[in-house]
Amino acid sequence: MDRQDGMSRQTAAEALVAGLESLGVLRVYCVPGESYLPVLDALSRSQRIATVTCRHEGGAGFMAVAEAKMRASAGVAMVSRGPGAANATVALHLAEQDAVPLVLFVGDVARAQRHKGAFQEVDYAQMFGRIAKHVETLIDPARMSEVIRRAFDVAEGGTPGPVVVVLPEDVLAQKIDAQDPPIRTYCPPTSPSREAIAWLLARLAASRNPLIVAGSRLGSEAGRASLLRAAETLNIPVALSFKHQDLMPNGHRLYGGHLGFGAANDYVRLVESADLILAVGTRFGDVSSQSFRLPAARQVFVHVYPDPAVTVRARSPQMALHCDPTAFLDTLSASAKQAPAERAAWIDRVSGFVQAQRQWVARPPAEDGVDFGAVTKYLDAHLPSDAIFVLDSGNFSTWLHRYGEFDGARRVIGAVGGAMGLGVPGGIAVALCEPDRTVVTLVGDGGALMTGAELATAVAQNISLLVVVSNNGSYGTIRQHMNRRYPGLAHATELTNPDFADFAQSFGAAGFTIGTEAEISPVLDEALRLRGPRVVDVRSSLTRLSAAADLNT
């Protein structure tokens, strides 16, 4: 206390850290900067928030995004002004694309230097205004608690996304009266009206070929349970949106497949043959809608999402319900009193096609390297049922999307927005969130060298993470697109790579190499037996780039 009236005083930076503690933040991912030293000072004394020092602001942002996906609450990253903020932009873009809550704190120039072209000064409202949901600069330190609360409310509300809070360095050291800690605004789950449910149940009763398309807003344990219950109660197959094939057990008779990139033409035609599509908890963007091919013009389309701006963006549905997706499914299940229409033929048709596509057929070894599909299938078969996969972006991930076995407990964390570089830092954050579960990152050689230096963070944090690198010496996805348009052309896609096992060992991690298919089993068995950070360099085939390559021939 330093006031005669007995009221305690604290710096604005201390108020910030106290506010983050009250909001339940467990970790702050950062690259330290001189523009927010008072915050680092306050974090050094926090008993509830761990400071995770990263090697690049993009890595810090990716870690915050991955933690947000795991915890379903806003991830937090801190960076310094100018270059630091610019480096974090990739994570902000991914948070916007993936509808993930992220709060980025940016240390800034002092208030007296603003708008004068000071060292590393940036107008963050202009820089992030089209990506972030909200950008705010704290001018009055006494409003710290208010600004923090608003940042988290905006990031987590409606369509979740990124928020940027700019902190002028002179504000942070100022003393202010102790503040009441911020609390999130309580928004009770909204349920649909009786009239809306009655309208929908009438159409479901008349539908012989309905299909539910489920997405990220059902990612909680309650959401998954509600989805399965609704599917079984209403007897409707469920297709899962891009990179969310872990929302429902894939072996279930009502599992309706994965609407991702490279979906088989026959599968898309199958989905088009549904007479009603009920999209729940998904924005139903261009990937899940197969470049807005879905819904077909003749299909009844009902869209359930909390944000009205989403449901009218691409195609107007016959009914748009702006309510909580889990509450909607619970109400729908409870209201379904009559037996659903006979749909055995439709369910058998969908399930038969989807399960046939998921059957792994071993092939002869590739002549130009290891079949990464065989590596993925071995991992899938030998990991615990509650393992967590973290996927970087690239064609190598299609093997898990097509053949992975997600039974309800296993999770997958990936970049819906397609950002390369999530894999290694995302795996670190997931391993920090779930230290007792097996966490495996699958990453291409391109993504591995974008953010692979975060292996230093993995070693410093002493986490257990297995990183499996598809090393085919190419930007494989771009090469595949290039070959389709310009057959035989590989210009600018060839890569010169390090030995990733040696690369890992240079950081103090364990390193392994798979050079032939005969080495898949012994090497992965050894890598899975160990704990700590470890990397497997798979010298993978360029001729077997994608699990989707043979679907549309």
Image (cartoon, rainbow, N blue to C red):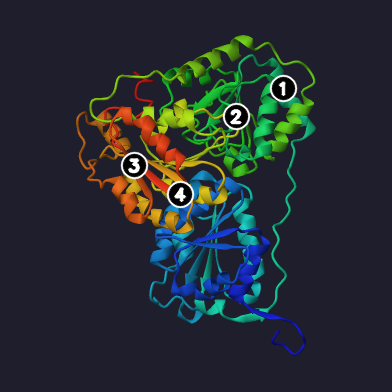
Image coordinates of residue 258 in percent, x first then y, are 50, 27
Q: Give the mark toward the camera: 2 or 3.
A: 3
* Residue at x 63% of width, y 37% of height: 218
What residue sits right under mark 1 in the picture?
A: 233
Q: Secondary structure at mark 3?
A: strand
Q: Residues within 10 Å of mark 4 (few under 14, many from 20)?
A: some
Spatial CA span between label 3 and label 4: 13 Å
Residue under label 2:
248
Residue type highlighted by circle 2: Met
Q: Earlier in the sequence, mark 3 or mark 4?
A: 3
Q: Quadrant of the N terminus?
A: bottom right
- Residue 417: where, in percent of width, then height? 45, 43
Few, some or many residues within 10 Å of mark 1 (<14, 14–19, 20+): some
Question: Is residue 291 something that shows in the picture?
Answer: no
Above or below, 393 relative to 261: below
Q: Nearer the viewer, mark 4 or mark 2?
A: 4
Instruction: State the CA–CA distance, disc 4 to disc 2.
Output: 30 Å
Numbered mark located on residue 532 in the image: 4
Q: Position of residue 102 (x, y in %)?
A: 55, 54
Q: Nearer the viewer, residue 324 or 19?
A: 19
Label 3 and label 1: CA atoms lie apart by 48 Å
The CA distance from mark 2 to mark 3 is 33 Å
Rendered image quadrant of residue 59: bottom left
> Circles 1 and 4: CB distance less than 8 Å?
no
Mark 4 or mark 2: whose residue is earlier in sequence: 2
